[in-house]
Image (cartoon, rainbow, N blue to C red):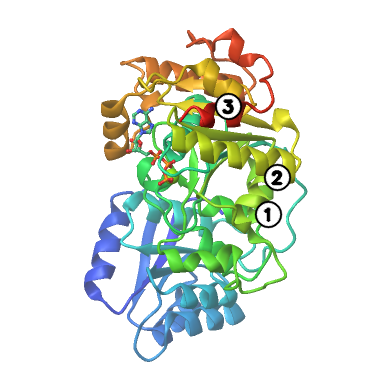
Amino acid sequence: MSGVIRVLLVDDSELVRQSVRAMLELDSAEFEVVGEAANGLQAVAETARLQPDVVLMDINMPDMDGITATAKIMASTPVGVVIISVQGEQEYLRRAMKAGARDYLLKPFTCEELVKSLRAAATPGPSLMAASAPPPPKRQGKIITVFSTKGGVGKTTIVANLAAGLAQGGKVKVAAIDLDLEFGVLATMMGVRTQGSIVDLCRLEQPITPELAGRLLAKQNQSGVGVLAAPPLPHLASEVDGDGRVDRSRSYVSELIESLSASHDFVVIDTSLSFREANLIAFDKSDLILMVTQPEITALESTAKGLDVLLDRLEYPREKVQLVLNRSDTASGLSHEEIGASLGHPLSYLIPSDGTATLVAANTGVPMVLKRASRTPITEALLQMAAQVGGGEGVVRETVPVPVQLLKPATSGGVRRLFGLF
Ligand SMILES: Nc1ncnc2c1ncn2[C@@H]1O[C@H](COP(=O)(O)OP(=O)(O)OP(=O)(O)O)[C@@H](O)[C@H]1O
Ligand SMILES: [Mg+2]
C-alpha cells in the first residue's frame, strides 16, 4: 500500500466519530477519513462502496453490531478492521478477532495508540485469529525470574529496574511479564498504560505467537521495555494457569514465555509469593532465578525454605539460583557474612535501602535506574546487577562490592545455626 491510509469510521455515537476524526486529521498527511457509518449495516455497504484501507469499528451498535458487520465485510470486501471495545467486553473481543478483525483498541485510547493500530491494520497480513503456528524462534533471549518466599521484599522494584537497566535506553530488546497473576502491579510501577493483559492472550483460542504476545506489550517510554500486565482482577488469574483456562490441555504461561524470548534479548518475570503453576513454569523456563530477600529474620527463614524447594526438591542447579539481598544496609543486627553462610547459598547482589527513591519511582512510574542525572548507591547497585545479569557487556558501573567471604560456599547447617540465635 502506498500514500494516504483511507479510513472508514463506524460508531453509533456522532461524538466518538467526531473526536476520532479530529485525532486523525491532526495527521492528515497519513490518514484520510473517507466516510462514516452509524451501524453495522451501513458499515458493510460503505466498505463495499468506498473500498477503504481500514475500518475502525465499534462493537455495540443498533441494527447490526460490529462483530457481525466485520464477518460480513471479511466475506465480501476483506479489509483491515480495527475493533473498538471497552474493558469488560473481552468475550466480544474474542468473537471479533474470530470474525477477522486485525487489531483492537480499548476505550479510552490515545491518538498515538489509534495511529499505531490503524497503521498495523492497513498493512497487508493475516488477521489476529488467522495467525497460526508460531514462526521458528529467531533468537532465544535470556529468561530471568525474580521470586521470593516473603512478600514485600522488593521483587517488583527489582524487576522494573532490572528490565529498564538491561534495556540500555532501548538498545537491547527487553520484555517484562507480570506473573503476579492476582495482585500484579508491575505495569503501574513502570508507568505504562496497558492495552490489555495476559488474560486476553489466553482467551484468543489459538497458539500464542511472538506477534500476538508483542501486540499486548505496553512500552515503557524512557527504556523501551515492553510490559505485559497481570490480569486486571484477581479472579481472572485462574484463566491463565488454573481451572478457568479455556483449553485445559494448554500451558499459556509456557507459550507466552517462549514467544517473548523468541522476540526479545531478555525476558524478565515478576512473580507472586507462591509455588502456583505460573511460577513453576517460569522457574523451569528460566536461565536464572533471582531470589530476593531482606536482612530480617522472618524473610530469611522463608528464603531458606524457598531455597530448599528450588535446590533440593525441584533440583535446579545451584548456579541457576542467585540471591539478592535487598535493603542490604539496614541496621539489622545480622552481618552479610552470617546471612550468606546461614542460607547455605552465596549472596550475589546487595541492594541498599532508599525509601524515598523507591517511593518516588513507584509513584511516578519511572524506574530509579532511568534517572541518570541523580546516581545514588541504590541506582548504582541496580545497574551493576543489570550489567552482571546481562553478561556484563556495554555497561561499566562503579560497583557496590559484594564482600569476598559471601562468595565462598557456606557451611551446611547454617540456617539452623542462624535461626537458633533467635
Ligand atoms: N531497596 C529498597 N529500599 C527502600 N524501600 C524499598 C526497597 N525496595 C523496595 N522497597 C519498598 O518496599 C515495598 C515493597 O516493594 P515491592 O512492591 O517491590 O515488593 P514485592 O516483593 O514485589 O511485594 P509483593 O510481595 O507485594 O509483590 C515498596 O514500598 C517499595 O518501595
Ligand atoms: Mg510485587
> Which of the two residues, 339 or 399, is positioned nearer the viewer here?
339
Local SS, label 1: helix
> Which of the two residues, 159 or 17, is positioned nearer the viewer here?
159
The image shows residue 176 at horizontal and vertical percentages of 52, 42
Instruction: Verify CB contact (< 8 Å) between mark 2 and mark 1.
Output: yes
Q: CA distance from mark 3 to mark 2?
A: 34 Å
> Which of the two residues, 110 or 72, is positioned nearer the viewer here?
110
Q: Which residue position holds label 3?
A: 417
Of callouts 3 and 2, which one flags the residue occurring earlier in the amino acid sequence? 2
Local SS, label 3: helix
Q: Is mark 3 within 8 Å of ligand 1?
A: no
- Which amino acid, by three-letter code, is at mark 1? Ser
- Residue 341 placement, left or right of 313: left
- Which amino acid, by three-letter code, is at mark 3? Arg
Give the quarter the ligand 2 occupies. top left
Local SS, label 2: helix
Rendered position, 23 above or below 88: above
Residue 304's quadrant in the figure?
Answer: top right
Of callouts 2 and 1, which one flags the residue occurring earlier in the amino acid sequence? 1
- Which amino acid, by three-letter code, is at mark 2? Lys
Whether residue 82 is visible to the viewer of this picture, yes or no, is: no
Q: Which residue position holds label 1?
A: 254
Instruction: Verify CB contact (< 8 Å) between mark 3 and mark 1.
Output: no
